[in-house]
Image: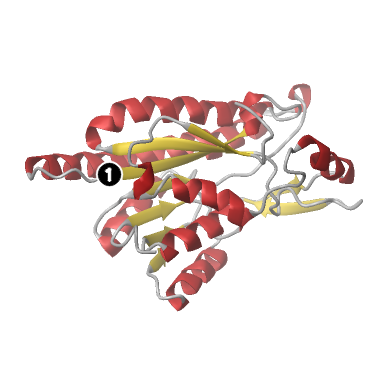
Amino acid sequence: MNKLEGKVALLTGSGRGIGREVALQLAAYGARIVVNDLDSAPAEQVVAEIRAAGGDAVACAGSVTAVDFPERFVKTALDSFGGIDIIVNNAGYTWDTVIQKMTDEQWYAILDCHLSAPFRILRAAQPVFSAVAKQEAAEGREVMRKVVNISSVAAGGNPGQANYSAAKAGILGMTKTLAKEWGRLKVCVNAVAFGHIETRLTQPLAGEVKTVSIEGREIKVGISDELVAAAKTMIPLGRPGTPKEAAGAVVMLCLPEADYVSGQTVICGGGFGSV
């Protein structure tokens, strides 16, 4: 289980849900983790879980859209662990409505979180990847590093999600571009597009109105009971996925077995969805 021993992984949105599971699974394989969440409490909780299991982790809380976040995130990894080997751009949420009702604030909030933030994080990490790649090449060594960007089957279009669908389609284009730019740096860049995964954002409403607070905004979350029931017929495996199952699709792209896989999109949707 020590396939990632000595590796350093940066994970955005890893204090809860799918991100938390990715952090725990990568740590179980031996990676040292930089845990990020919008709030410090869940980030520190995941750090504590990893340490209690014998792993190593630190927290870097804060919004991925903050101007200073990318450099702070990268610096945390370098100061704490001395390098970067894996980056998972997972942080995100939905803020839905039909296009004629969608405000500029709504549009840009989702684009900033799902597309601009990963771009800035990867831009900040590029000098680190470049420097170590040159050093390793001079020493005659090939060390593979990994980036996994999180997309969605909504990248193929979903009513009420013009902002989210555009962002998730955009991350696929960026993934393919960086796979071509960073191959010479021995960095594999892939994406995972999730289908219906059970998280706090997709919880059944059961006739209630549910919200979460994100950067001072109360965002409605959850899906109707009708959609929950429809999932059982739409998804070939007959049910939504769990955060643990979703995390597995991300983690497998970080393992040495995926060292020659780059520029690809893995759909984790139980047989449902395309992008």
Residue located farthest toward the top when viewing the structure as drawn: 100
Measured along the vertical axis of the image, is residue 192 above or below residue 254?
above
Residue in the picture at 33% in, 51% down = 74
| Lateral position of residue 36 relative to residue 74, left or right | right
Dot 1 amino acid type: Met
Q: Nearer the viewer, residue 246 or 16?
A: 246
Residue drawn 64% across and 32% down? 153
Residue at 30%, 38% in the rendered image: 187
User: Is any atom of residue 68 visible in this view?
Assistant: no
Q: Quadrant of the C terminus?
A: top right
- Where residue 225 appears, as percent x and y from the top left, is 88, 46
Placement of 27 over or under 216, stated as above or below: below
Name the image colouring.
secondary structure
Q: Is residue 252 something that shows in the picture?
A: yes
Which image quadrant for residue 174? Answer: top left
**Residue at mark 1:** 144
Figure quadrant of the N terminus = bottom left
Residue 142 in the image, given as x and y percentages of width and height: 19, 43
In this picture, residue 68 sits left or right of residue 36:
left
Q: Nearer the viewer, residue 70 or 274?
A: 274
Nearer to me, 98 or 206: 206
Which quadrant of the figure has residue 186? top left
Q: Is residue 256 above or below residue 180?
A: below
The image shows residue 242 at horizontal and vertical percentages of 66, 53
Quadrant of the rendered image containing residue 180: top left
Q: Residue at x 82, y 51 (%)?
A: 204
Q: Nearer the viewer, residue 206 or 230?
A: 230
